[in-house]
Image (cartoon, rainbow, N blue to C red):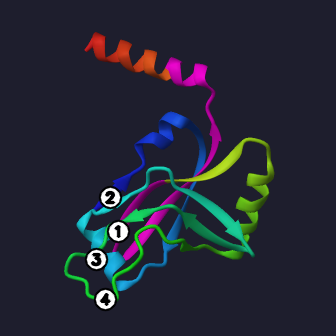
Amino acid sequence: MEIINRKAKFDYFIESEIEAGLVLTGTEIKSVRKGSADLKDTYVRIKNDEAFIINMYIAKYEEGNIFNHDERRERKLLLHKKEIRKLKELTKIEGYTLIPIRCYIKGEYAKISVGICKGKKNYDKREAIKEKDLKRLES
């Protein structure tokens, strides 16, 4: 199952991507495998040389019991220290941020593709809509 953040490509220029592991509890991984997750309005923050994904929605697992998870808790990302330092330096540059692009299952593990992004201006977004409409009319 793959969950894609469609809004990210519209709102940001994606400079590069990096793959990270995602620390999940038992009921969370079951919900992700079912496709009950959303990356809308999520971002990555680096605190104390650790990366966390903020505001990611994973629906409660229906068959879960009292140990079910909180839907929007902070989840830790698994990255090497060198990668975290590199991302920290890049986010210090004006206008750059870390945005999750897609979440997917690789083998038995949940992975997140994190994009190093620069925000688009309104005129860039209008240009993207215009190109999309022209392409649709031509075909």
In the image, what residue occupies the spot 30% across and 17% down? Answer: 136
In the rendering, at what x and y percent does residue 64 appear? 25, 83
Q: Secondary structure at mark 2?
A: strand
Q: Is residue 108 visible?
A: no
Magenta stretch in the rendered image: 101-127
Read off the residue under disc 2. Answer: 2
The Cα–Cα distance between marks 2 and 4, rounded to whole angstroms, is 27 Å
Residue neighbourhood size for the residue with mark 1, other residues' Cα within 10 Å, grouped as few (<14), some (14–19), many (≥20): some
- Would residue 126 be counted in the magenta stretch? yes
The Cα–Cα distance between marks 1 and 3, rounded to whole angstroms, is 11 Å
Read off the residue under disc 3. Answer: 30
The Cα–Cα distance between marks 1 and 4, rounded to whole angstroms, is 26 Å
Residue neighbourhood size for the residue with mark 3, other residues' Cα within 10 Å, grouped as few (<14), some (14–19), many (≥20): some
Q: Give the residue type that dot 2 points to.
A: Glu
Residue neighbourhood size for the residue with mark 2, other residues' Cα within 10 Å, grouped as few (<14), some (14–19), many (≥20): some
Residue lying furthest left: 63
In the image, what residue occupies the spot 57% across and 38% down? Answer: 12
In the rendering, at what x and y percent does residue 32 appear? 32, 69
Image quarter hosting the N terminus: bottom left
Tell us which disc is closer to us: 2 or 4. Answer: 4
Residue neighbourhood size for the residue with mark 4, other residues' Cα within 10 Å, grouped as few (<14), some (14–19), many (≥20): few
Left or right: residue 72 compared with residue 119: left
Residue 114, placed above or below residue 25: above
Read off the residue under disc 1. Answer: 105
Q: Give the residue type that dot 1 points to.
A: Ile
